[in-house]
Image (cartoon, rainbow, N blue to C red):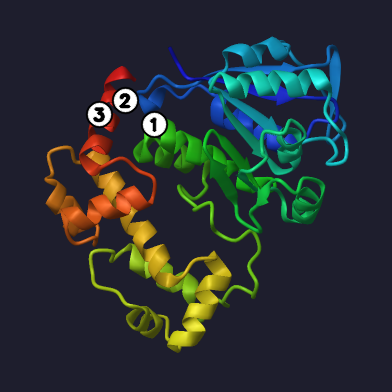
Amino acid sequence: MPHHVAILAYDGLCTFEFGCAVELFALERPELGVSWYSYAVCAEESGLLRAAGGLYVQVPHGLDAFEVADTIVIPGWRDAGDAPSPALLASLRRAHARGARLCTICSGAFVLAHAGLLDGKKATTHWRYLDRLAQDFPAIDVQQGVLYAEDGRIVTSAGSAAGLDMLLHLVRQDFGLDVASRVAQRLVIPAHRDGDQAQLVARPLPAPGEPGVAQLMDWVRENLRAQHTVDSMAAQARLGARTFQRRFKEATSLTPLAWLVRERVALAARILETRPQLAIEAVADLSGLGSAESLRHHFRKHGLPPPARYRSQGRAASRTG
């Protein structure tokens, strides 16, 4: 059976965030050759619901759709200070208890917070609401400024467009890098932005032609197999090593070497999915991770299964699709 997604609608609906969820999960994508998601849009309220922009929506399903959903998406919330109803909170708690994956965009995190489902977990929201989330719900490990945060079966994202990054992250988990990249191409957005990437860039982006971090990152992605150090990357960016490290951390919230490893792991995963006959040692070499032992080590650190199992799971998913 296809992975079933329930998308919550509500009076005062956040139109953009809702549209992101519908775009990802409700469109048919026969060109992908996989068993794409099934979906249901559901609401607690009946009748016409108001949405941002003067729109009205009529929703075909009630909260009983949560009872059979594999993933539930809460696309924003009408007001961070507006407590959801006991019925909605109870329905979310039941879904979580039976193993459903719960995901929020922007202020939708407050719904799960009111349900108590974020207590003791890492979570994020739009940068405007971070302090309020931390103040109102001190049991939550609020992640400052990241694009999205994942803790077990709960994934929360920052405002608006960061929701697309989170939703693509879910597609990568469910269908692999190749399918996620093709969906991103159709949406004309980057195929992968790490959740740890900063919501806000602390300094202006370089002017056209100015050497700097963005150009360096593009160059490294084209040369991941080569040897790289902080000094060599700084030289390529035509910056001093200390200035380079500071600007890189401001732009990405990662150190240059941590980012480099993540890019290499992502490339290795893509090779495993698309070149099934290639030996694990060769995958490690092509991705710049050096050896099969190093590849296994970094997959484990990034929460991925061992490379051989990762490859076999991807092939199994392709067969079932």
Q: Residue at x 38, y 50 (%)?
A: 302
- Image marks 3 and 2: residues in contact by CB distance under 8 Å: yes
**In which quadrant of the rendered image does the N terminus lie?**
top left
Q: What x and y, as percent, mark residue 303?
A: 39, 45
Judge whether 126 appears above or below 316 on screen. Answer: below
Please give left or right for residue 71 compared with residue 41 in the image: left
Judge whether 7 appears above or below 150 on screen. Answer: above
The secondary element bearing badge 1 is classed as helix
Q: Badge 2: how crowded within 10 Å, few (<14), some, or many (20+)?
A: some
Residue type at mark 2?
Answer: Ala
Q: Which residue is mark 1?
A: 175
Q: Residue at x 72, y 34 (%)?
A: 116
Kindly identify which numbered label has been placed on residue 315: 3
- Image marks 3 and 1: residues in contact by CB distance under 8 Å: no
31 or 81, nearer to the observer: 81
- Sequence-wise first label, 1 or 2: 1
Q: CA distance from mark 3 to mark 2?
A: 5 Å
Q: Which residue is mark 2?
A: 317
**In which quadrant of the rendered image does the C terminus lie?**
top left
Q: What x and y, as percent, mark residue 160?
A: 69, 45
Q: CA distance from mark 3 to mark 1?
A: 10 Å
- Sequence-wise first label, 3 or 1: 1
Q: Residue at x 38, y 57 (%)?
A: 262
Q: Is residue 211 visible?
A: no
The secondary element bearing badge 2 is classed as helix
Residue type at mark 1?
Answer: Phe
Residue type at mark 3?
Answer: Arg
Q: What x and y, as percent, mark residue 27?
A: 54, 24
